[in-house]
Image: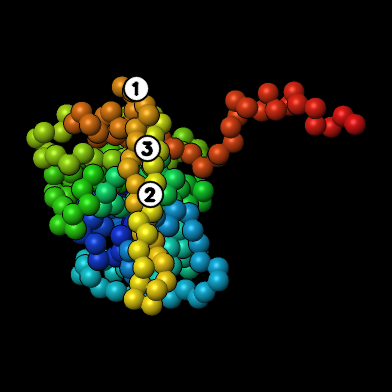
Amino acid sequence: MKKKPLILVTNDDGISAPGIRALISVMKQIGDVVVVAPDSPQSGTGHAITINSTLYINKVNIDPDIETEYSCSGTPVDCVKFAVNEILHRKPDLCVSGVNHGSNSSINVIYSGTMSAAVEAGIEGIPAIGFSLLDYNWNADFESIKPFIKKITEQVLQNGLPEGVILNVNFPKLKEKDIKGIKVCRQAKAMWAESFDKRTNPMGRDYYWLGGKFVNLDNGEDTDEWALANGYISMVPVQFDLTAHHAIQGLNGWNLNKK
């Protein structure tokens, strides 16, 4: 009998979020599941790790089918590090992160705790996928995307991923029957035009809320933003090597070492 793959599940919305519970329900159909996820929402934490305070881990029993399920006081990246080094003591066959409540397409991948957990797994040499749904509603419909999550996960387990590559998968807010398919894309060139809402508290001290508008600067039809706007699931291969290889030759032409 073929041994089931060991799958680590995490997220950034917190261990009780509907998105991760939906993801767990799919992963149980595929392999043996271990869950290590934040005990509270950690959206927008990026690749932060906890170094100036203590970490706490609690064994929980949210899903009676999962024997190994822990909540962690730290960030999504902390969760992956703790799972590999303290709980499993080995690399799982796959790490899946999400399903995030909201988009992680385009530049959002930089800020995403969901994707940073997947990237951390990739750094550890573990095939990894980050899943996100373009619906911020806590009670979003995750049922429609479960068949696609299962298909993508099985394909990764069957085919593997190139070294240093992680998948960033985003789902449009559509019913299953209305999703046109899966497109392998590049990350769209986009940014946030930030603004700060300045207010004053009862003690007379100013405080600020960060806001802004998402601006897509990319008209290409091969991007994640185009795919999502046109009814497709976007799948972007991302990497943690941030070297701008195309710039090396030009920089070597600078007068850097001559006196």
User: Which amino acid lies under the numbered mark 2 shown in the image of this protein?
Assistant: Ser
Question: Which colour scheme appears in the figure?
Answer: rainbow
Tell me if residue 156 can be seen: no
| Quadrant of the drawing holding the C terminus | top right
Q: Provide residue 132's location: percent of width, then percent of height.
A: 28, 46
Sequence-wise, which precedes: disc 1 or disc 3? 3
Identify which residue is drawn at 26% across, 57% down.
20
| Image-quadrant location for residue 223 | top left
Front position in the image: 35 or 74 = 74
Identify which residue is drawn at 34% across, 47% down.
212
The Cα atoms of the two marked residues, 1 and 2, are separated by 27 Å
Identify which residue is drawn at 29% across, 65% down.
15
Sequence-wise, which precedes: disc 1 or disc 2? 2
Identify which residue is drawn at 50% across, 76% down.
54
User: Which amino acid lies under the numbered mark 1 shown in the image of this protein?
Assistant: Gly
Q: Which residue is mark 3?
A: 106
| Image-quadrant location for residue 138 | bottom left
Q: Provide residue 18's location: percent of width, then percent of height.
A: 20, 59
Q: Which residue is mark 2?
A: 195
Labels 3 and 2 touching (C-beta < 8 A): no
Q: Which residue is mark 1?
A: 220
SS label for mark 2 = strand
Front position in the image: 44 or 149 = 44
Above or below, comparing residue 121 to residue 243 in the picture: below
Asked whether, in this view, residue 94 is left or right of residue 120, the answer is left
SS label for mark 3 = loop
Characterize the local packing of mark 1: few (<14), some (14-19) or many (20 or more) Cα atoms within 10 angstroms. few
Q: Provide residue 211's location: percent of width, then percent of height.
A: 34, 51
Front position in the image: 150 or 229 = 229
